Amino acid sequence: ALVADNVDDILSTIHDQFTLDSSTLFKITKAFLREVSDGLSNYGHAMAMIPTFVKGVPNGSETGTFLALDLGGTNLRVCEVTLHGDKTFSLRQQKFRVSETLKTGEVTTLFDYLADSVDAFLTESGSPTTAVPPSLTPNPSRDMVNPLEEEEDSPAVPLGLTFSFPVEQMALDSGILLTWTKGFSAKNAIGKDIVKLLQNAFDRKHMHVNCVALVNDTVGALLSRAYTSGGCILGAIFGTGTNGAYVESVANIKKFGDSNPAVALGGDMIVNTEWGGFNNSRTALPTTPYDNKLDRESINPRYQAFEKFISGMYLGEIARNVILSLIDAAPRPVLFGGRASDALNKQWGLDTAVLSEIEEAWVGLGRFAPLPGKEDEDEGTRLERVRGVVVQRLGFADSDVSIKDAEIVRKVCSLVADRAAWMSGCAIAAVLVQTGRAHLAEEGASENAAKLRDDGQRIGVGVDGSLVEFYPNFETKMRESLRILVGPEVESRVNIGMAKDGSGVGAALCALVAIKQQ
Ligand code: ADP
């Protein structure tokens, strides 16, 4: 337990543990770059740097209609995506529940369910699917053909599968499952080709659907942001977990070896970093006792180390650990008169969404946005709102929570979330440095600026996930560390935008690439 005579001493210790100075940010980023290089050189690293066989990014002129299937989030999603060729798209989708039985049963049963879901989507959509072969011209209407109006030998409907589990990819349309995550454990799947499993299920049901591409959700975010904004170099997820994919030069993917056909083709290839597994050795991560507790009690101790500092699955739990230590502080409790609530006593009892809500109550965003003309709120009003959220969401009686408690809880939430955002900025900075678009400011960013790639140009980054979408000021905080790391000039050119419907649109774009390459 925390021991100190003075509440301010206790709080300032926690503040120092969670606040990263610039030398720590540089240390993290340099270690990140080393692990990027290791992962590109050899197979088997936790930060796996998986080549995706996607060789380019779209520019918004692509057209066609495709099916997309998305497995890996909370729901199974089937969508039909039409790319209009003018950076816009339309999308129709249906969600299906994946029961625990399916997640943990035979893998063929799970994939039969995927095929059935696609079948149900195609049947229920009323008009048969309008999926058409892609057109490379920017005029969609001219090339629209309904395959079901054609002869029997019309091409099968192309489908892209977004599959957000670790997969070692061998080609655009083949990849072997390395391990299940996120509560899935279907039998006889590990080591199998995911595309074959799905295609076999379609074939068993005599469905005229062809799975042509296997896509990670990070790649989907990158492709869809590139399509809607005209260019993108990095796709990053900050949701339940965190991960990123970026455009790398094939020449840098040393582990391919000279005999790999990809090497002869040269050019670029999107690499899925699996950066959630960065620094499992924790030599560069600013680990606190609260992080150690979380890790020890997690289902995968010592794995996904970076992710455990950053993503939505963990931030609430880190904050819960800090809050409990303040409740238990000696010689006097610092919070709630020494009493915890049921929610606080339960592992995972504090959802990251609650941290977000506390922050919104403090800054006056979301449902707490002040009425026009009433923006000048005093601190008391804002803290009273925070107190309301603490009472409601942490499950206390109104009289158990003082304004001072609210103030401390609010500070704890900010410390945990700010650290996450700052560390996310390290990952983005490392990708900029790795791809020659930035130098680490420590090493003289300004003097070297002339030698940078894409000098003076906008640098596109597509992001997705509830944390970056909803946590107040997550991007602002991420930019604070980015600015320190790469300097304000480069930082100001980084254009961060949400990759809307990334998994659907990304899968469609990947299916298009696959067909072009066939
Ligand atoms: P997924 O990554 O599974 O596709 P999301 O991007 O929605 O799904 O991320 C879910 C995670 O985000 C959960 O860990 C949840 O705690 C967290 N989360 C949900 N809502 C919010 C919110 N408003 N603010 C911050 N985090 C949130």
Image: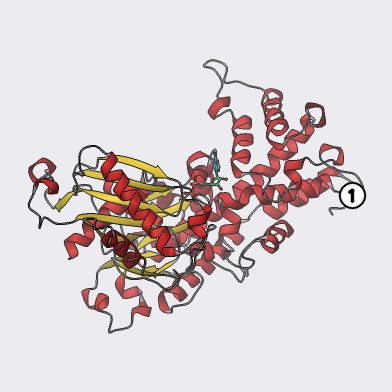
- Across and down, in percent, residue 61 comes to 18, 47
Where is residue 336? Give x, y as percent. 82, 37
The location of residue 471, given as percent across then percent down, is: 54, 40
Q: Position of residue 487 (x, y in %)?
A: 46, 54
- Tell me which residue sits at (51%, 48%) in the image: 478
**What is the secondary structure assignment of the residue under circle 1?**
loop
Residue drawn at x 63%, y 44% as measured from the top left: 351
| Residue bearing the label numbered 1 | 330
Seen as rendered, the residue at the extreme front is 205
Above or below, 256 against 166 in this view is below
Residue sitting nearer the eye, 161 or 113: 113
- Looking at the rendered structure, the kind of residue marked 1 is Ala
Quadrant location, the C terminus: bottom left
Query: Would you place residue 419 above or below residue 359 in this image?
Result: below
Q: Do we see residue 330 in this rendering?
A: yes
Horizontal side of residue 459 vs 320, given as left or right: left
Tell me the quarter of the picture where residue 8 sits.
top right
Residue farthest to the top? Answer: 373
- Does ligand 1 reach within 8 Å of label 1's beta carbon? no
